[in-house]
Image (cartoon, helix red, strand yellow):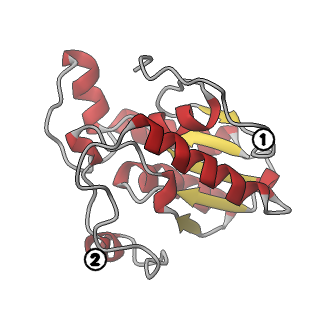
Amino acid sequence: MILLRHGQSEFNLHFSATRRDPGIKDPKLTVLGQHQAEQAAQALAGEDVRRIIASPYTRALQTAAPLARRFGLPVLVHPMVRERYAFTCDVGSPRTALAMAWPELEWSHVEEVWWPPVEEPAKQVEARARLFRAEMAALPDWQHTVVVSHWGFILSMTGESVGNGQWLRCDPCMPAPAEISWHHR
């Protein structure tokens, strides 16, 4: 499967400049982030994509939208692939607000408040990634899936740090990384 990190968000823009949490909840993509999402869709155009899974964060949904248009596929919202809750940007939008903004997506399986109430320990994110890895490995066509996710979740899946709009391949049938360093960001 392909793991795609969302494009640059308003949070990423400010945090990378100051290294301080700018206090933006569920940030949208910047103009650069929108461009990165379009570039990713173009770069993946030759792939045999049959499923698009995205985190419920606005930045992930916005990144998945060009892929969905290009491949004519629905975006499947999956809270399990969300970011590690550690900053203000990891406070999501309630399901009802997301359903109004993205009425074409299925929301009935998503809790109204789907993000954790407190900072999520790294080990909990790694456990969530292992569970998702097993879920994907059980699918006979996992190779045809793009997952639009986040830095921490992709790190937990692969042990690799990826930038905004970057993607990499992940075989869920292979073992999870033995050790993960959370100091890349």
Q: Is residue 71 above or below residue 172?
A: below
Residue 150 is situated, as x and y percent measured from the top left of the image, at 46, 40
Which residue is the site of mark 2? 96
Point 35% across, 75% down: residue? 99
Identify residue type, mark 1.
Asp
Instruction: Label 2, secondary structure: give it.
Output: helix
133 horizontally vs 181: left or right: right
Estimate how packed mark 1 is, as few (under 14), some (14 to 19) or many (20 or more) residues with alpha carbons within 10 Å. Answer: some
Residue 85 is situated, as x and y percent measured from the top left of the image, at 32, 44
Residues at badges 1 and 2 in contact (C-beta under 8 Å)?
Answer: no
Point 47% across, 43% down: residue? 125
16 horizontally vs 39: left or right: left
Instruction: In this rendered view, identify the residue nearer to me: 128 or 151.
Output: 128
Residue 6 visible in the snapshot: no
Cα separation between marks 1 and 2: 34 Å
Which residue is the site of mark 1? 171
Given this view, does label 1 or label 2 mark the residue nearer the observer? 1
Which quadrant, please, contains the C terminus? top left
178 horizontally vs 165: left or right: right
18 horizontally vs 41: left or right: left
Residue 148 visible in the snapshot: yes
Q: Quadrant of residue 53?
A: bottom right
Looking at marks 1 and 2 on the same chain, the residue that comes earlier in the sequence is marked by 2
Point 69% across, 43% down: residue? 2
